[in-house]
Amino acid sequence: MSAPEKESWPPLSPGERAVAIEVLTHGPLSRSALSRRLGLSAGSLTRLTRPLIDSGLLVEEAATAQPRQGRPSQPLAVVAGSRHFAGFKITGDAVHGVVTTLRSEVVARRSVPLDTHDPGRVAALLADLTGDFASRFARLAGIGIGVAGPVRERGVVVDNPFLGWSEVPLADLVGERTGLAVVVDNDVAALAEAQAWFGAGRGLDRFALLTIGAGIGYALVLDGRPVRTGGGGIGRHWIVDPCGPLTPEGERGSAASLLTIPSIRYQVQAATGRPATYAEILTAAAAGEPAAARVVTEAARALGVMVAQIADLALPRKILLAGEGVGLMEVAGDVVAATVRARRHPDAEPVVLETEVSDFHAWARGAAVLAIQVLVLGAKQGV
C-alpha cells in the first residue's frame, strides 16, 4: 500500500496537554468552564489554548449568548472528523478493525479471518486493511493494535498464547509497511483507556474493568490511567474455588477454569458428551437443562466472588464488566448479585456493577483510542 499522508501535531506541554484532554473528553467547553475545571486563570488559559487552536487540534465554535451575561461565549471543541484512526484487535483466528473519529466514534468496521500466525504476514494483513481504510478516510493519523498478553514499550508483543508469539516487534513491522505511527498494547489495557477517555469510566478517579471471554482480563484505572503491571494471564492463577473444576484453561478452581468461554464449553461437553456453542449453553441454562445450568451457575458464582474481591480490595467507584462472555449476566445475573452480597460486609458500600455488551469491534475501538492518545499527547510512553 502507498503510505497515507501523516497527520500530527507538535508535542504538547503539560498544560496544553491537560487542556486538550479536557476538551477532547468533555467538550465542547466554554473558556469559563474550562478555567474552573482546570483551576486556571483566564490569561493562562488563553496562553495554553492559542497554540492548540493554531495547530488545528481545537476550534472555537460559534459564539452563543450567556444568560445574565452581556459577553457571548465561544466554546472550545475538537473537530471530530478532522482526523481518523485505525484500531485493530487480533485474536487467534481473525483480525477485527475499525476506523474512528478523533472523538472515538466508529465510522467503519471490518473483520477478516487469520489463516497464519507468522508475524510478518500478520503485519502485511494489517497493512492491507489499513490501506483499505486509508482509501476511504484520507486523513488517517495513526494505528492502534490490541493483543492479549504483555506488551513492552507499547510496541513489542512479549508473549501471546493465542498467536504463539514471543518478543515480536509488531509496531515496527506494521509501521514499516504503512508509514504511520503505530502503538501496540495489551487489549484489556486499551479497552480500559477507551473507557477512561470516552466511556463509562470518564470522569471517575478510580474504576476497575473486568473482561470475560476467551480469557480473563482485569485493569484498575486511577486518575484516568490504567495501573501498569506488565503481566498477563491473570485468570489462570486467580483461584476462586480451590475445589473447583480442573480444565485445560487454568489451575484447579481458577477464574479461567470456571469462567472463560472455552472452559464453560469444555465442562458442558464433558458432562453431556456433546459440543455446544457458548450461546447454546446460555440458552440451555436459562431453560433449566441440568448440566448447562450447573456450569453456568458455578461460573456466575465465580464472577460474584471476583467482583466482591475487587470491590473490597481496590475500592473502585465502579466495576465495568465487558467482553464476549457478558451474556452470562442475562442468564445468571441474580446469582452474581447474591454472591457479591454474601461475600461482602453488610455495611459495605454497594458495588456499582455496569455491564457493557461488547464484541471484537469494541476491542478494536479501544485500540484506536491508543492512537488518539499518541496523537494528542505526542508520545507512546507515559500515556
Image: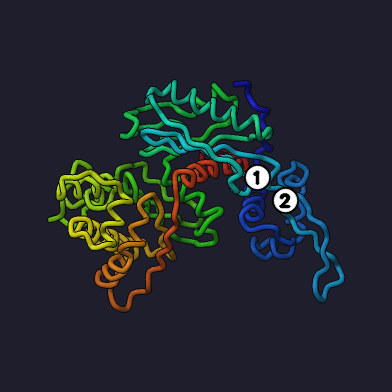
Name which residue lies at 34% across and 28% down. 166
- Mark 2 and 1 residues: CB-CB less than 8 Å, in contact? yes
Name which residue lies at 33% across and 58% down. 328
Label 2 vs label 1: CA separation?
9 Å
Residue 292 makes an appearance in the image: yes
**Mark with earlier residue (2, 1):** 1
> Which amino acid is tagged 2?
Leu
For this orientation, the residue located farthest to the left is: 243
In depth, the one of 101 and 132 nearer the eye is 132
In the drawing, does residue 30 fall left or right of residue 149? right
Residue position marked by numbered label 2 in the rendering = 48
For this orientation, the residue located farthest to the right is: 70
Name which residue lies at 50% across and 28% down. 126
Residue position marked by numbered label 1 in the rendering = 13
> Which amino acid is tagged 1?
Ser
In the drawing, does residue 320 fall left or right of residue 338? right
Image quadrant in which you'd find residue 153: top left
In depth, the one of 73 and 4 nearer the eye is 4
Report x, y in % for residue 128.
54, 25
Q: Quadrant of the N terminus?
A: top right
